[in-house]
Amino acid sequence: MLAQAAAPLKSPALTTMRSTIAQLPGSKIRDVANAGLGRPDVLAFWFGESDEVTPAEVRQAAAESLQRGETFYSHNLGMPELREALRAYTAGLHGDPGPDRIAVTSSGVTALMTAMQLLVDAGDEVVVVVPVWPNLPAQPAILGANVVRVPLAPDAAGAWRLDLDRLLAAVTPATRVLLLNAPNNPTGWALSRTEQQALLAHCRRTGTWIVADEVYDRVWFGAGRAAPSFSDISTPDDRLIVVHSFSKSFLMTGWRLGWLLLPAGHLDAVGKLIEFNSSCAPVFVQRGGLQALAMADDFVPPLVARLRAGRDALCPALAALPGVQSATPDGGMYAWFRAPGAGDSLAFAKHLVADHGLGLAPGAAFGPEGEGWLRWCFASQDTARLLAGVDRLKHALRL
């Protein structure tokens, strides 16, 4: 009688790891990008960043800081001068938030995780509007929360809309946090002022916190200098945390600098969390942020104009392709579209890279609600490059 083969031994590290962490999915965007990195023939539009470098003045401010030897720890909450500059910047867009409400973090994603750590215990309910950048629902899940997904839905033209009544029904007194990203990555959806007012009033009644990821607030093509913000309509005592980042509006994705706007009285607790996570943002990076804010009025509007030019070149060209469903977004830096044959969006995106030299993000990266869709970052200085990508997509679709 033959002996049965022994079961393969599991690594002790794998058997003792938290199951939530072991089961976290890898980045499907990275999965596609890794298939094309190093290939000079690939037109890459998969990541959410511009192909422009950080402004020279910002880089110079950081370099001078390093030359002065500013290589030591700073305050957990950020340098006082940067926090005051962020207060003035916020005041110019949304009204003065008042003192002692801003904390600087090492990146916008760290700001989001800090907000989750401040609010969420294991077993808490967190409602999140999807599809969305995968880090947002993953963070409360990592902390052991019960994540409830409320989907947007596309209309006939391909624009994604919120069912406000459905969302209001999902947020109950049992809901600890409502997590929103608007303008939204990947769909370009944005909250209207009426929707914001309804959500804020409802969350006041239920005692639910709102965590608003507004990192794309200046990448806005509608009326006004910024997208509608909860900061416009809230009070300092509301259960509201607004998350911002220097990454998108100031071309500083690699710098890793963000900030939080918090209710009054919460800075000390957030300072403790920052200490336990990263201690502080590097001083030279904060000096770069100070310079970015100093030139915001001169720099951001032309940047948004260039992004608008990319949007206005790409989106109509996509919409003109037979079988493609797409709409022009009001905010953000992405075209979000459905194409024939993209039902398995990861496989289709890998096919585009391998056979057509076109790098896009698969919709499945943003949750099951995005399956069958693709995200195309139009933050490119060269509109001809965007249109060359459309030609490659057209060839892939055999049109």
Image: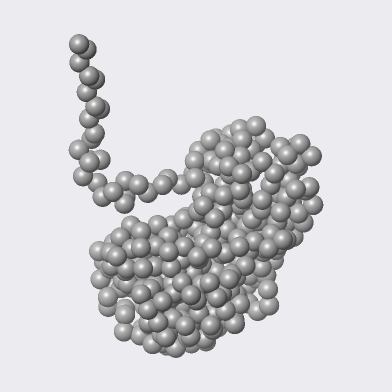
Would you identify the image quadrant in which residue 305 lies? bottom right
Residue 178, position as x, y percentages in the image: 43, 72
Q: Is residue 318 left or right of residue 1?
A: right
Closer to the camera in the image, 191 or 265: 191
Residue at 27% from the left image edge and 78% from the top image edge: 268
Residue 348, position as x, y percentages in the image: 61, 39
Q: Is residue 364 left or right of residue 148?
A: right
In the rendered image, the vertical position of residue 196 relative to residue 129, given as above or below = below
Residue 217, position as x, y percentages in the image: 56, 71
Would you identify the image quadrant in which residue 314 lies? bottom right
Q: Is residue 303 left or right of residue 384?
A: left
Residue at 79% from the left image edge and 52% from the top image edge: 320
The reply to whether residue 149 is visible in this rendering is: yes
In the rendered image, the vertical position of residue 46 relative to residue 98, given as above or below = above
Query: Where the N terminus falls, by quadrant?
Result: top left
In the rendered image, the vertical position of residue 130 relative to residue 224, given as above or below = above
Outermost residue toward the front in this view: 1
Residue at 38% from the left image edge and 73% from the top image edge: 175
Residue at 64% from the left image edge and 61% from the top image edge: 154
The colour scheme is: one colour
Query: Where the C terminus falls, by quadrant?
Result: top right
Closer to the camera in the image, 374 or 80: 374
